[in-house]
Amino acid sequence: MDGTSIVTIERHIIEAERKYPDASGAFSNILTDMALAAKVISRQVNMAGLVDILGRVGRRNVQGEPVQKLDVFAQDVIYRAMDHTGHLCCMVSEELEDPIPIPDSFPAGEYVLLFDPLDGSSNIDVNVSIGTIFSIHRKVSDSERGTLEDCLQVGRKQLAAGYVVYGSSTMFVYTTGHGVHGFTLDPSIGEFILSHENIRIPEPPNRYYSVNEARHSEWDPGMRRLLEHFKSGGDGEGAFSARYIGSLVADFHRTLLRGGIFMYPGDRSNPDGKLRLLYESSPLAFIAEQAGGRASTGREDVLDVVPTSIHQRTPLFLGSREFVDEADGFLSQG
Ligand code: AHG
Ligand code: MN
Ligand code: MN
């Protein structure tokens, strides 16, 4: 596509589907439905200060974290955009303990959607960028309605992954294994327009490290040495700068466009860290690899981790390949 074409996300998905004859329309429809849900959530996020949607709903989600009203809204919007389409056999949401069945009144399909409806909840009330993350797998069980086996698939088998970042503009970024493509929402026409085709993490990367240093005293010695390594300029070519927004999607979006490394390591009290494998680390790992980067647990590629439970957590080192490789080196020294 030349630089002057107006390409909506729907058109981009259809053209991608044409290129890959084995791609079924169902898969494209899931992505299109996700874009619709993103538009609805974006509108609500941008009105959050005006509509009484701020603050907590007074309960805690399966992670034990206080649930913010926008979390509930985003969860509900995605569910209602997806439950009746006949493309999904089940869903997994960060907000719900168990896999979400497709109501018997609706047909079930061949795909599984796993998602974090609203990422960066602690930033909702202070007008800092937040996001949505999703991952799509193909159903592998013989069951019509989807089972835990369909949800617990290794990241390398993902068919698609994406995120929405609700920031100074709303962007929808996705991959189906054929590059990473970004679309910016034009709210005046309600369309996501192709604005970042074939995103590649810059080489040489900007030298950013992104980590919550408050947990420094809890880290393993290898992690502490890694941070000192970056603080002292890494392997050369200039000093690092620290950037940490506290919304994974926003920290990753910057890393994707500028380079650097995002880190959420394990520590003494949380050996597996905080971030969830299936609907945070794994989809962003797929995107990072498709953009020329890497994602590691510090011991292995995130995409090779075989899940054992739907809300399991994993340490995460994500971004420019050279920096993630360095992280593995320091962490393997223990
Ligand atoms: P969520 O709002 O979906 O629970 O995700 C919050 C995550 C992630 O967005 C961010 O990187 C991390 O929490 C920040 O954790 P700390 O506040 O411990 O740094
Ligand atoms: Mn999250
Ligand atoms: Mn969340």
Image: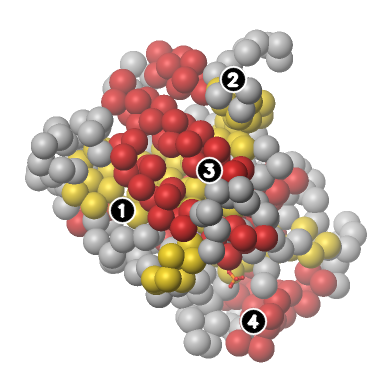
Label 3 vs label 1: CA separation?
A: 22 Å
Which residue position is annotated with label 3? 44
Tell me, for residue 229, which label it has, or none: none
Distance from mark 4 CB to nearest ligand 1 atom below 8 Å: yes
| Residue at position x 82%, y 72% in the image | 231
Nearer-N-terminus badge (4/2): 2
232 horizontally vs 84: left or right: right
Which residue position is annotated with label 1? 92
Which residue position is annotated with label 2? 189
**Label 1 sits on what residue type?**
Val
**Label 2 sits on what residue type?**
Ile
SS for dot 4: helix
| Residue at position x 55%, y 82% in the image | 267
Question: Looking at the rendering, which quadrant does residue 211 occupy?
Answer: bottom right
| Residue at position x 61%, y 27% in the image | 187
**Label 3 sits on what residue type?**
Gln
Foreground of the two, 58 or 20: 58
